[in-house]
Amino acid sequence: MKRLEHARVLMYSHDTFGLGHLRRCRTIAHALVEQFKGLNVLIITGSPIAGTFDFKARVDFVKIPSVIKLHNGQYTSLDDHIDLEETLEMRRSIIRHTAEHFQPDMFIVDKEPLGLHGEIEGTLRYLKKQDCTLVVGLRDVMDAPHLLKEEWKRRGILPKLDELYDDIWVYGPPGFWNPLSGLKTTKRLNQRITYTGYLERHSPAETAIALHAIQGDYILVTTGGGGDGAEMVNSVLSAYEHAETDDRYDLMPAVMILGPFMPTQEREAILKRAEKHKKIHLIDFDNRIETLITGAKALIGMGGYNTFCEILSFDKRAIVMPRVKPRQEQLIRARRADELGVIQMIEPDVAAMPEKMAEALEALPKRRKPSEAGCWLPLDGLEKIGEIVEAHLAKPARPELRVIAGGG
């Protein structure tokens, strides 16, 4: 382990929908403190369930008021009694004061270059004057190019991205997708882009105990945060119901993780349906999902960034049913991965046909693993990030002025 004495990294995760942003920041933070002694990481997060996760020594988080994204893409305060603008003002204030007191050497922003509703722009300008290295980390796929272009133009993102940031990290390989395709980026900005490769995931240490221990072979169905996962879960349930009436099928048992953000009404309806099926085991949430993935024979998911990294990291046969709105990120990722033979993509309209879904589930445990697809999707992102951080932060310390007693 190398040493970066007294180095401080601040991370920002706006967290308006699901678990993806916080889990990605936490993965990077844990990798950094494992690689470097003396390094401390502080994560600013809006996730309402940040406290349910374990954090390694020298990694901590600051919770800012939660804001949630609705299915139409609009935002609202998690607390119905607080106005959105008031919530955003509190968030801006906490973010700025945290930066002023923590005095980071590097600020890593997840996905949103200016934060939610531009809430970190003032903090970025402050930290730039403090000689702090400013980094924005982007998913391998952000959105459909025409949608991202329209959104970023409306919010004035691209000129400020060019003006403020020292580095742009893309958490994927260059041959998979260009998250900024369709945008008119400058040569100067392009020179600051680094493709890191995917962020590898690992099972918890043997001493760590998952909340749920599952015996026997099973297919894991994971919705991520679960806020929009009910459609996928219901499609899988319909396939199992169909299989029970058709002796051509003998489906492997399924473990379904509903996610902490699945709406109560949808959750209760799924629970009622699942009670009738001996092959279905439901779990609300497990903060050590890696253990459940390790034990699974195959995986079904929606194709978010973290799930895709887990499919690759644990080399799991997988079916992906992507979300198609309000963003097309999952759809683009799933189509590209399907083209490469890494996963099987099933679009929602096909998944809604129980017989087609039952056929896919029957074949899933026999399909090839990602490692057998014949394409190379590197999982060295955490190592690459460590190298970049070391290059920025292992510079000789600036000499301090000392007051010398004496003289006359």
Image (cartoon, helix red, strand yellow):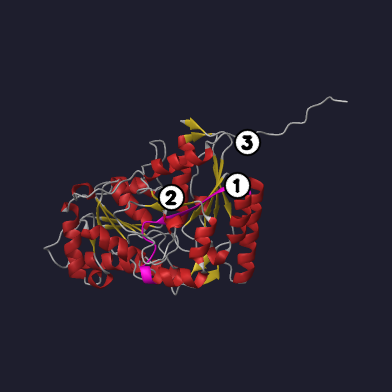
Q: Secondary structure at mark 2?
A: loop
Vertical placement of 114 versus 167: above or below?
below
* Residue 131 badge: 1
Relative to the observer, which residue lies in front, 70 or 138? 138
Look at mark 3 in the image and give the residue it sits on. 398
- Amino acid type, callout 2: Asn
Q: Quadrant of the C terminus?
A: top right
Span shown in magenta = 130-146
Q: Residues within 10 Å of mark 2 (few under 14, many from 20)?
A: few
- Amino acid type, callout 3: Arg
Q: Which of disc 3 and disc 1 is earlier in sequence?
A: 1
Question: How far across and how far down the image is residue 334, in percent?
Answer: 28, 61
Residue 60 sits in quarter:
top right
Q: Is residue 395 left or right of residue 214?
A: right
Q: Secondary structure at mark 1?
A: loop
* Residue 72 badge: none
* Residue 287 badge: 2
Residue 82, visible in the rendered structure: no
Q: Which of disc 2 and disc 3 is earlier in sequence?
A: 2
Which residue is painted at 63% across and 54% down in the image? 126
- Residue 112: say if magenta: no
Q: Residues within 10 Å of mark 3 (few under 14, many from 20)?
A: few
